[in-house]
């Protein structure tokens, strides 16, 4: 074995070791969640359960602990995601299709808005919501969810929309379609993977958001699951680890199901080959 081949082998081994370390960093927390959910004596250690049990799931599968917060989360995040995708598509369309001197300043302003930390704007937002009587309302929280995700959603939507040939719309315009009809019937169906990406990204970011609903919602019966999970952390450092792990699995299920449902759209392409030929 030559010196060069030994050096290449050492580099491959080092790269493999690094990848294994990264994989372990992701796998160990997931392993703790799954094992602890079935362990009657769960703690912070990753270990095989002392004995398999479903008591942790039985303890959390109640209306107050799980079902009502999950329904609140689905309503908040589903409504916020639908509003974000609709507004992002309407905002990205003129930015992608029409040239203006204001396009670049507007996009830079949107980019600046994505860098604002949410904690820096919550105090004025809270004061505004009190003035307009939107505090402690699900619809007000949906509006803020959508507003907070909209800047980055516009950026993503515009980049995907740029990949749809304008000639397809021009053919629709010749047949009498207006801009809104061409957007709904031509552009959005062709950029299905882009819409799927924006949908998943927006939903996941809202689903895991603790701070916004914690600040804007006051009634316990309106709290989403991202806030109610805090109930498993008791006083004086006491934590119900088994129930926390079981709740985490149930809490993650809607996001996993959403990804599975649109995975084919995410893996697909724009399939525009030959669309503008002839």
Image (cartoon, rainbow, N blue to C red):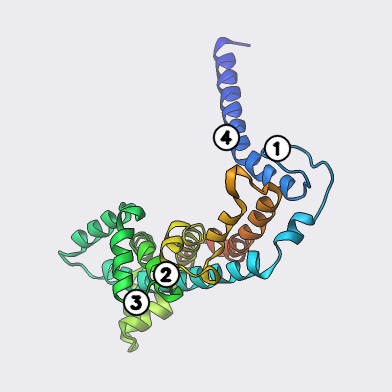
* Quadrant in the picture for the N terminus: top right
Residue ID for mark 1: 46
Spot the residue most to the left.
101
Side (left or right) of 199 relative to 6: left
Mark 3 vs 1, N-terminal side: 1
At mark 2, the secondary structure is: helix
Residue at image position (52%, 73%) is 75
Quick check: marks 3 and 4 in contact, CB under 8 Å? no
**Where, by quadrant of the figure, is residue 263 drawn?**
bottom right
Residue 167, percent across and down?
33, 73
Residue ID for mark 2: 141
Query: Is residue 278 something one can see in this rendering?
Result: no
**Where, by quadrant of the figure, is residue 95 drawn?**
bottom left
Q: CA distance from mark 2 to mark 4?
A: 36 Å
Specify the label residue 22 is tagged with. 4
At mark 3, the secondary structure is: loop
Mark 3 vs 4, N-terminal side: 4
* Quadrant in the picture for the C terminus: bottom left
């Amino acid at each position: 074995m030559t010196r060069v081949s030994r050096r290449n082998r050492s580099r491959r081994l080092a790269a493999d070791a690094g990848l294994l370390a990264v994989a372990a960093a992701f796998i160990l927390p997931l392993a703790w969640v799954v094992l602890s959910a079935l362990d009657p004596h769960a703690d912070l250690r990753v270990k095989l359960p002392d004995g398999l049990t479903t008591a942790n799931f039985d303890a959390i599968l109640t209306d107050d602990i799980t079902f009502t917060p999950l329904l609140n989360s689905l309503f908040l995040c589903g409504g916020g995601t639908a509003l974000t995708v609709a507004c992002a598509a309407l905002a990205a369309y003129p930015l992608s299709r029409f040239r203006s001197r204001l396009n670049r300043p507007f996009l830079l302003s949107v980019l600046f808005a994505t860098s604002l930390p949410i904690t820096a704007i919550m105090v004025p937002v809270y004061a505004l919501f009190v003035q307009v009587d939107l505090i402690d309302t699900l619809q007000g929280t949906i509006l803020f969810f959508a507003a907070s995700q909209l800047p980055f959603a516009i950026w993503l939507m515009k980049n995907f929309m740029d990949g749809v040939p304008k000639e397809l719309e021009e053919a629709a315009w010749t047949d009498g379609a207006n801009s809104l009809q061409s957007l709904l019937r031509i552009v959005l169906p062709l950029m299905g993977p882009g819409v799927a990406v924006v949908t998943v990204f927006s939903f996941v970011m809202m689903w895991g958001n603790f701070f916004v609903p914690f600040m804007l919602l006051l009634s316990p019966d309106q709290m989403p699951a991202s806030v109610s999970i805090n109930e498993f952390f008791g006083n004086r450092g006491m934590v119900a680890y088994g129930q926390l792990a079981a709740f985490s699995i149930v809490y993650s299920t809607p996001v996993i199901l959403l990804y599975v449902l649109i995975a084919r759209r995410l893996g697909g392409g724009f399939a525009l080959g030959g669309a503008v030929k002839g």
